[in-house]
């Protein structure tokens, strides 16, 4: 990471974590606090494709969506000054977590399967959770993915915490790291 950053070249911050961990809500609050541009990978992919995520999954398949996520990280967002909320499966793909770490700081939001289930159960926009037993699906996916989430530069639990509190923890992590990198 370049340590001679000007205020217009603040390093990017990537928020990762499972669906329903609050990346978008806490991320947007943290971005405002930090003076970073908030970008949501799902929204950018939908805008670029002109289709909702569920339609992309239905018409082109999950693997096509995963390629769009990779393209978004490689070429589809600014290199500086952004807080990027990443779709839950993005950092799990081969090479993607390293790609995020090369481009900035990475913080993961964490929650337990039951909490995720409660937070996502009434939202029909996530194709992977439109199954007869979403709680089991969440537990299975979380187990498969936890290695990637826990390998972030910082892991923040969102259990029993409001989005505002989580956003403050995200902002503190970013500021602490920014301060220590400019001291070097
Ligand atoms: C997915 C998470 C979703 C979205 C897509 C797939 C995943 O994003 O990218 O439905 O594989 O975990 P959010 O984590 O923002 O819900």
Image (cartoon, helix red, strand yellow):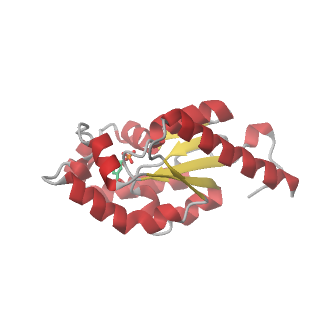
The x, y position of residue 147, in whole percent, is 46, 68
Residue at 35% x, 66% y is 143
Vertical relation: 62 (above or below) 8: below
Q: Residue 13 in the image: x percent, y percent?
A: 61, 47
Position of residue 10 in the picture relative to residue 43 (left or right): right
- Position of residue 73 relative to residue 40, above or below, is below
Quadrant that contains the C terminus: bottom right
Q: Quadrant of residue 140?
A: bottom left
Instruction: Please identify the quarter of the rendering in which residue 136 is found.
Output: bottom left
Q: Is residue 14 above or below residue 101?
A: above
x then y, percent, for residue 32: 61, 30
Nearest the viewer among 57 and 33 is 33
Q: At which x and y percent is residue 5?
A: 80, 47
131 lies left or right of 109 = left
Report whether 47 appears left or right of 118: right
Q: How many marks?
A: 0
* Residue 3 in view (yes/no): no
Q: Residue at x 74, y 42 (%)?
A: 9
Q: Is any atom of residue 85 visible in this view? A: yes
Kindly identify the residue that appears in the image at 47 percent across and 60 percent down: 91
The residue under the point 24% across, 42% down is 121
Of residues 35 and 173, the one nearer the viewer is 173
């Amino acid at each position: 990471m370049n340590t001679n950053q000007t205020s217009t070249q603040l390093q990017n911050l990537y928020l990762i974590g499972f669906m329903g961990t609050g990346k978008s809500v806490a991320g947007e609050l943290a971005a405002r606090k930090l003076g970073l541009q908030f970008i949501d990978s799902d929204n950018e992919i939908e805008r670029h494709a002109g289709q909702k995520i569920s339609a992309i999954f239905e018409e082109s398949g999950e693997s096509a969506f995963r390629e769009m996520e990779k393209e978004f990280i490689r070429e589809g967002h600014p290199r500086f000054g952004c807080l990027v909320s990443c779709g839950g499966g993005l950092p799990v793909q081969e090479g993607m977590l390293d790609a995020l770490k090369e481009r900035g700081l990475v913080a993961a939001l964490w929650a337990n399967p039951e909490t995720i289930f409660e937070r996502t159960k009434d939202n029909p926009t996530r194709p992977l959770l439109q199954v007869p037993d979403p709680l089991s699906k969440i537990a299975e996916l979380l187990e498969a993915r936890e290695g990637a989430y826990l390998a972030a530069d910082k892991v923040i639990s969102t259990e029993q915490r409001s989005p505002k509190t989580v956003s403050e923890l995200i902002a503190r992590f970013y500021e602490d790291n920014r301060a220590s990198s400019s001291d070097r």
